[in-house]
Amino acid sequence: MKETILIVEDDKYILNFITISLKNEAYELCSAKTVKEAIETFYQRNPSVIILDLGLPDGDGIEVIQAIREVSQVPILVVSARQEEAQKIQALDHGADDYVTKPFSMGELMARIRVALRKGSVSLETHEARFEEEWLKVDYTTHQVWVDQTEVHLTPIEFKILKLLVDHRGKVLTHNYILSEVWGYDDEMTHANLRVFMATLRRKIEKEPGNPRFILTEVGVGYRFAG
């Protein structure tokens, strides 16, 4: 069964460019040009991934994200000309999974779509008992972590951060989201504190902390687990 991708884009040239490229990959495609059409088409077609432009004729793409997140965790990939970090963070904080800035290469977009499809195939409502990939193994039940079959000790906070990243692998998590999920509303925790925890976590689970395989930094925005 073909995966269905909903493209929400009002620029006909960009829409045609994306459509032609995705047709070559044998995806089932549908499109919308406004906020209203996007939400209606989402309910009609139940897509596997949504590619979303933020600047739409009848409103902001953030409205689409908010409406869909009330009922679904379908991966949403924002493709927008807005380059300011604050706007990227706003989209991600409202529930977007990823953000690609125009102009973009089709190769990059295709890679992001494949990550989104992999993420979408695993329901976040169903927590796995274990994560295992390459040299890293994480057991959620026993709170144990192994690197190359050697157990490494993580503090409760470090394990909580790692589990949050793994549960949302492939998705950019903003600094504020991680702080909120791990520490709640502790005003004393800052982005600088979070960087310290991330650096320590990398030293424990990465073979090359300076060139990480799993915990990637999205500069100015947050972190992504590349599992």
Image (cartoon, helix red, strand yellow):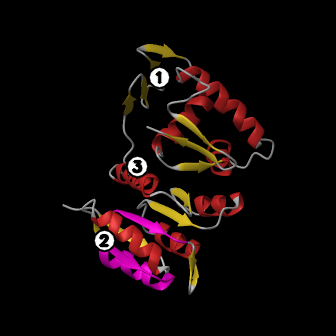
**Segment tinted magenta in the rendering:** 30-53
Residue located beneath label 1 in the image: 144
Which circle's residue, 2 or 3, is located before the other in the chain?
A: 2
Residue located beneath label 3 in the image: 115
Residue at left 57%, top 28%? 211
| Residue 49 in magenta stretch | yes
**Label 2 element class:** strand
Picture mark count: 3
Cα distance, mark 3 to mark 1? 26 Å
**Label 3 element class:** helix
Whether 52 is drawn above or below 155: the answer is: below
Amino acid identity at mark 1: Gln
Cα distance, mark 2 to mark 3? 18 Å
Amino acid identity at mark 3: Val
Q: Is residue 8 among what the camera can see?
A: no
Is residue 62 left or right of 108 when viewed as pictured? right
Of residues 21 and 163, which is closer to you in this image?
A: 21
Residue at left 75%, top 45%? 186
Q: Measured from the top left, where is residue 192 in percent x and y?
A: 77, 38
Amino acid identity at mark 2: Leu
Mark 1: give few (<14), some (14-19) or many (20+) Cα within 10 Å. Answer: some
Mark nearest the camera among 3 and 1 is 3
| Residue 41 in magenta stretch | yes
Residue located beneath label 2 in the image: 29
Whether 161 is drawn above or below 51: the answer is: above
